[in-house]
C-alpha cells in the first residue's frame, strides 16, 4: 500500500473548517477592524469557526525583517504566515486608500508563503470607504492579485460606502449592508 506522507502532513497541518477574517489595514482603531468583528459575529451565528487577523498587530518593521531574503526569519510574522497557510477560506475587509487597497496589505501578501497560502484557496472580499466608491477599484485590484496567486474570489463583493455614517459603537446600523454581509457569509460557507 502506498502511503502519501506529503498529503497526510498537509491534512494534519491545515485548518479547513476555520475562516480567517483579515482586517486589511494597520491603522489604529480602524473601521475595518470593527467590520471584521461584525463579520465574526455573523459567522458565529452560522456556527462557523473564525479568527480575526488584524494587520495592526504586525511587527512594525516586517517589510525589513520578514520579506525577500528574510522570509521565515521573523518569529512574530511567522505566526501570521502559519495562520494564513493553514486556512482554506479567507474574508478580507478592504478599506479604500487612495483609490485602491492599503499598501500594507500588499506587503503582507508579499510576505506569505507562495504558492501554498493561495493555491486553490477561496476568499470573499468586502470593500469599505468613507467616500462614495466603497472600495470598488480596491476590490478589483485585489481580485486580480488573488486570481494570479491561485485563490478563487467569491463573486459577491459588497461595497460599503460612507461606512463612517453607518457604524456606531461597533454596530453596523445599515440593514442593506448587514444583509449583504449575511448573504456573502452564507455563500462563502457553501463556496
Ligand atoms: C491613507 C488613506 C487613504 C484613503 N483614501 C481614501 C480614498 O481614496 N477614498 C475614500 O473614500 N476614502 C479614503 N480613505 C478613508 C477610508 O476609506 C476610511 O478611513 C474608512 O474608514 C476605512 O478605512 P479604515 O479601516 O482605516 O478606517 C483613506 C484613508 C486613509 C488612511
Image (cartoon, helix red, strand yellow):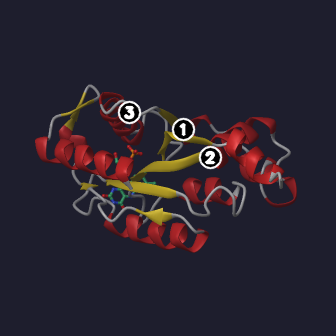
1 and 2 marks in contact (CB < 8 Å): yes
Counting from the top left corner in percent of width and height, residue 30 is at 41, 38
Left or right: 104 as drawn, with respect to 129: right
Q: Name which residue lies at 54% across and 70% down.
A: 145
The Cα–Cα distance between marks 2 and 3, rounded to whole angstroms, is 17 Å
Secondary structure beneath dot 3 equals helix
Counting from the top left corner in percent of width and height, residue 86 is at 64, 44
Q: Name which residue lies at 85% across and 53% down.
A: 70
Determine crowd level at label 2: few under 14, some 14-19, many 20+ residues with C-alpha closer than 10 A. Answer: many
User: Quadrant of residue 117 in the image?
Assistant: bottom right
Q: Earlier in the sequence, mark 1 or mark 2?
A: 1
Q: Name which residue lies at 12% across and 41% down.
A: 175
Compared with 29, 92 (above or below) is below
Judge by depth and name the residue closer to the eye, 90 or 163. Answer: 90
**Label 2: which residue?**
84
The quarter of the picture where the C terminus appears is bottom left
The Cα–Cα distance between marks 1 and 2, rounded to whole angstroms, is 9 Å
The Cα–Cα distance between marks 1 and 3, rounded to whole angstroms, is 11 Å
Q: Earlier in the sequence, mark 2 or mark 3?
A: 3
**Label 1: which residue?**
53
Left or right: 139 as drawn, with respect to 27: left
Q: Is residue 99 visible?
A: no
**Label 3: which residue?**
40
Q: Is residue 84 visible?
A: yes
Amino acid at each position: 500500500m502506498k502511503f502519501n506522507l506529503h498529503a497526510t502532513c498537509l491534512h494534519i497541518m491545515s485548518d479547513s473548517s476555520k475562516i480567517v477574517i483579515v482586517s486589511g489595514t494597520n491603522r489604529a482603531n480602524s473601521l475595518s477592524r470593527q467590520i471584521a468583528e461584525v463579520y465574526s459575529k455573523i459567522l458565529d451565528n452560522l456556527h462557523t469557526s473564525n479568527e480575526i487577523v488584524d494587520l495592526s498587530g504586525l511587527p512594525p518593521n516586517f517589510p525589513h525583517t520578514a520579506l525577500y531574503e528574510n522570509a521565515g526569519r521573523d518569529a512574530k510574522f511567522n505566526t501570521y504566515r502559519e495562520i494564513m497557510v493553514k486556512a482554506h477560506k479567507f474574508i478580507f475587509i478592504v478599506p479604500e486608500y487612495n483609490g485602491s487597497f492599503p499598501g500594507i496589505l500588499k506587503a503582507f501578501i508579499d510576505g506569505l508563503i507562495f504558492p501554498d497560502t493561495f493555491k486553490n484557496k477561496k476568499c470573499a472580499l468586502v470593500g469599505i470607504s468613507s467616500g462614495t466608491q466603497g472600495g470598488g477599484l480596491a476590490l478589483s485590484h485585489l481580485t486580480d492579485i488573488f486570481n494570479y496567486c491561485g485563490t478563487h474570489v467569491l463573486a459577491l463583493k459588497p461595497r460599503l460606502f460612507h461606512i463612517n455614517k453607518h457604524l456606531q459603537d461597533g454596530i453596523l446600523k445599515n440593514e442593506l449592508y448587514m444583509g449583504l454581509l449575511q448573504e456573502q457569509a452564507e455563500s462563502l460557507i457553501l463556496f
